[in-house]
Image (cartoon, helix red, strand yellow):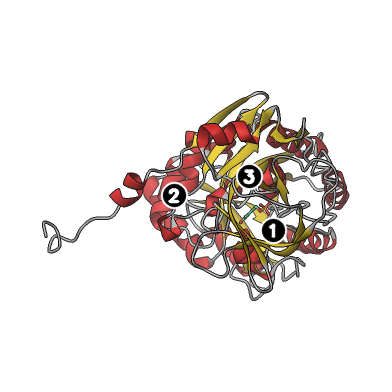
């Protein structure tokens, strides 16, 4: 049997009358209106997760900046903006999305290791709350930009605490061999330089050691090193007012047991007791990851010599995580099987011409039939944002559900739109 509620974290996505629904809307209704494949997100789940996070830090000066790269659809950002969220962005494009969704510049933190001068100019011109600087070169570039603009810009320095986040190696960012942050050993000199540069108001210390962390230990080690540096800087006369602890809290995809937000907050409250600082957090996946599904239709069944393939109309161009990170996503039929069924090993694959285009290999699943709808769960974060038109496939549409309503919040592009971005070289035109 399949349990009616699929994820303990997400009661908004559940079977009702034998059909998988997001809030009050059956996925088949959306499929009829929007075609497949499509992402469907629960606005209620997104809001609930944000509120949990905010409540866990109630009474502590803490700023929540939703990490836009997890899901940057304007409607998703606007849903969070309405609750008072700030944003953490990693490009001018994301900065523009946050502004367009109603988050003012003075609630935006700008992160990332390779901000161009033009991007820094844009951020400064839009009253960015804080720029998290990751190198000496960036610090000097920012100082020049700020001086040209006749402004002073608030800066935090992101450090690399050399901590093993115990997550997939492609999303670990806090080891010394990773490109992110400034090594702790070099940090005091960079802080001293920042404190002396014109146009720079040195405000804080930032850290982000990776994504999908499922244990508290690595956070504790990283934060304690950051707090130690904070105190050492204060002793040298560099007094900071802000600590930005980044994002990275994991979610349950399969059987992980990530810390609860209250456990995470409890540790941080304990560690920062007596420190007169404003805290900032940049959660992405925690807020949206389990709030979305990717719905797809079964095209064909094919029995290979050793594998039973279920060929679906979604592919790695829609959801890259399994291909890129070997990520696990639960897979369920949209119409619940009636009565008992025999789960057999099946491989769910997409139409893209790549062997890596697979959502599951040899996984025990209920029987599927061609034409039937399937849902790939926990697809709200790092899903649609990573989609592409590889194989000239129009990427999946996105739909936001609120109660019994739903709206297409990003249309599937037409073939004409996909082709219209190319230009025929003049010497080929008119042939
Ligand atoms: C990606 C990123 C985040 C968000 O990470 P999640 O694991 O989605 O919470 C936060 N801060 C920075 C600097 C990031 O690069």
Name the residue nearer the viewer: 396 or 409.
Answer: 396
Query: Is disc 1's CB within 8 Å of ligand 1?
Result: yes
Q: Is residue 305 above or below residue 338?
A: below
Q: Which residue is mark 1?
A: 211
Name the residue nearer the viewer: 148 or 313.
Answer: 313
Q: Residue at x 76, y 41 (%)?
A: 336
Q: Is residue 122 above or below residue 176?
A: above
Q: Which residue is mark 2?
A: 394
- Give the mark, 2 or 3, whose residue is nearer the N terminus: 3
Tag 2: Cα neighbours inside 10 Å, few (<14), some, or many (≥20)? many
Residue 419 appears left or right of 40: left
Q: Which residue is mark 3?
A: 372
Asked if disc 2 and disc 1 are in contact, CB closer than 8 Å, the reply is no
Q: Residue 50, percent across and down? A: 72, 37
Q: CA distance from mark 2 to mark 3?
A: 21 Å
- Give the mark, 2 or 1, whose residue is nearer the N terminus: 1
Query: Is disc 2's CB within 8 Å of ligand 1?
Result: no
Asked if disc 2 and disc 3 are in contact, CB closer than 8 Å, the reply is no
In the displayed orientation, state which residue is furthest to the bottom: 177
Q: Secondary structure at mark 1?
A: loop
- Give the mark, 3 or 1, whose residue is nearer the N terminus: 1
Q: CA distance from mark 3 to mark 1?
A: 34 Å
Q: Residue at x 70, y 34 (%)?
A: 21
């Amino acid at each position: 049997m399949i349990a009616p509620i699929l994820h303990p974290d997400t009661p908004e996505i559940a079977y009702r009358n034998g059909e998988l629904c997001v809030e009050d809307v059956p996925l088949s209704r959306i499929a009829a209106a929007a075609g497949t494949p499509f992402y469907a997100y629960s606005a209620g789940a997104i809001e609930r997760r944000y509120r949990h996070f905010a409540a866990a830090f109630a009474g502590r000066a803490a700023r929540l900046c939703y990490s836009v790269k997890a899901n940057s659809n304007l409607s998703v950002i606007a849903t969070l903006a309405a609750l008072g969220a700030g944003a953490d962005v990693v490009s001018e494009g994301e900065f523009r999305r946050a502004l367009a969704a109603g988050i003012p510049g003075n609630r935006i933190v700008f992160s990332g290791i390779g901000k161009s001068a033009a991007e820094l100019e844009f951020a400064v011109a839009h009253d960015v709350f804080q720029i998290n600087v990751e190198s000496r070169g960036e610090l000097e570039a920012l100082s020049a930009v700020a001086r040209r603009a006749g402004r002073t810009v608030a800066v935090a320095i992101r450090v690399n605490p050399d901590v093993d986040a115990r997550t997939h190696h492609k999303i670990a960012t806090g080891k010394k061999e990773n490109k992110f942050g400034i090594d702790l050993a070099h940090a005091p000199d960079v802080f001293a330089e920042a404190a002396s540069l014109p146009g720079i108001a040195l405000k804080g210390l930032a850290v982000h050691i990776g994504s999908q962390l499922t244990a508290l230990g690595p956070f504790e080690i990283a934060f304690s090193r950051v707090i130690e540096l904070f105190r050492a800087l204060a002793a040298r006369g560099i007094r900071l007012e802000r600590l930005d602890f980044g994002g990275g809290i994991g979610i349950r995809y399969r059987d992980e047991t990530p810390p609860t937000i209250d456990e995470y907050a409890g540790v941080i409250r304990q560690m920062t007791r007596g420190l007169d600082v404003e805290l900032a957090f940049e959660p992405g996946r925690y807020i949206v990851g389990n709030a979305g599904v990717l719905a797809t239709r079964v095209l064909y069944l094919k029995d290979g010599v050793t594998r039973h393939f279920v060929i679906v109309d979604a592919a790695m161009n829609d959801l890259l995580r399994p291909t890129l990170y070997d990520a696990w996503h639960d897979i369920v039929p949209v119409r619940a099987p009636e009565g008992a069924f025999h789960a057999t090993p099946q491989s769910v694959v997409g139409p893209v011409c790549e062997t890596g285009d697979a959502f599951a290999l040899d996984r025990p699943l209920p029987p599927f039939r061609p034409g039937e709808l399937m849902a790939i769960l926990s697809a709200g974060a790092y899903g649609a944002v990573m989609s592409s038109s590889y194989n000239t496939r129009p990427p999946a549409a996105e739909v936001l559900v609120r109660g019994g309503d739903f709206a297409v919040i990003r249309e599937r592009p037409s073939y004409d739109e996909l082709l219209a971005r190319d230009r025929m070289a003049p010497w080929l035109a008119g042939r």
